[in-house]
Image (cartoon, helix red, strand yellow):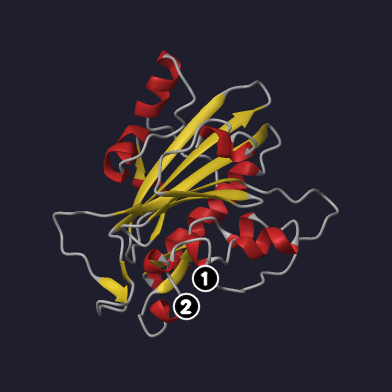
Amino acid sequence: MTELLSHCREARYGAPAADQIMVNRYFTIGYSYYFRQAKWALEIVGRIDEGEEAVERLDNFRSDFRIPQAFRADLVDYKGSGHDRGHLVSSANQREGEMQNSETFLLSNMSPQKPKFNRAIWKDHESAVRELDSDPKIFETYVISGPIFDFGKSIKVIGSTDKNGVSIPIPHRYFKSILTENNRGALNMWSFILPNEETHKKLADFRVPATKVENYAGIILWERLRGRKVASEKKRVRAMWKI
């Protein structure tokens, strides 16, 4: 995996393990065969420079044929499910070119989200991250997102439930961990865990230490970073940036 990710800018500070690592042109997916969806999606937020025009959202949802059929989500699995094809890497984060935006519509980048979650606080969260990245003092913003399953609760599925079909479990919650590097070389982290449901709480109410995301999602975040300062940052709940 180290060799596979050696030329990926977004994996500069590490990428968790997964059943299948898929390096796209602008972001990387760690796919779970067991959950039939990404375990995590890692990106650097794309920034549109002044004077440049962002491409239109393409909406070309499609299967990712790099994944074995037995573990692959298809469009039919979401049809009539009552759940959105929720982006892990936001389409609006990747709008510098058509290919860049198109890749975000691969179903390997989707997870079944309740509409009132996907179209509300999850969308607001994506916008808030772009607001953070727009700070001229920040050089790069790294984001990793993915599903969380509470195994003490019942797990519902979408898609086929027969022996020849693929069923996709619906996550109970989602995480998003953000790492920024500023013009002084300082690294700051923010992490969130949000329930896959409608909420009227503020985004700041869902802040958690990065260590909690690691425990709940079963991953190691930013594993190439070392030292006491990093360990302290992972345990910290940093104040919310201005939105």
* Numbered label attached to residue 236: none
Give the amino acid at mark 2.
Leu
Q: Amino acid at mark 1?
A: Ser
Q: Are marks 1 and 2 in contact (CB under 8 Å)?
A: yes
Mark 1 vs mark 2, CA separation in Å: 7 Å
Q: Position of residue 83 (x, y in %)?
A: 38, 75
Label 1 neighbour load within 10 Å: few <14, some 14-19, many 20+: some
Q: Measuring from the top left, give residue 215's x and y in whole percent.
A: 27, 38
Q: Nearer the viewer, residue 209 or 135?
A: 209
Task: Single out the residue that lies furthest toward the top.
Answer: 228
Which of pointers 1 and 2 lies earlier in the amino acid sequence? 1
User: Where does label 2 land, which residue?
Assistant: 75
Instruction: Count the labels in the image.
Output: 2
Measured from the top left, where is residue 128 in percent x and y? Answer: 54, 50
Q: Is residue 82 above or below residue 53?
A: below
Say which residue appears at 46% left-offset and 70% top-offset: 85
Residue 139 vs residue 111, the one in the foreground: 111
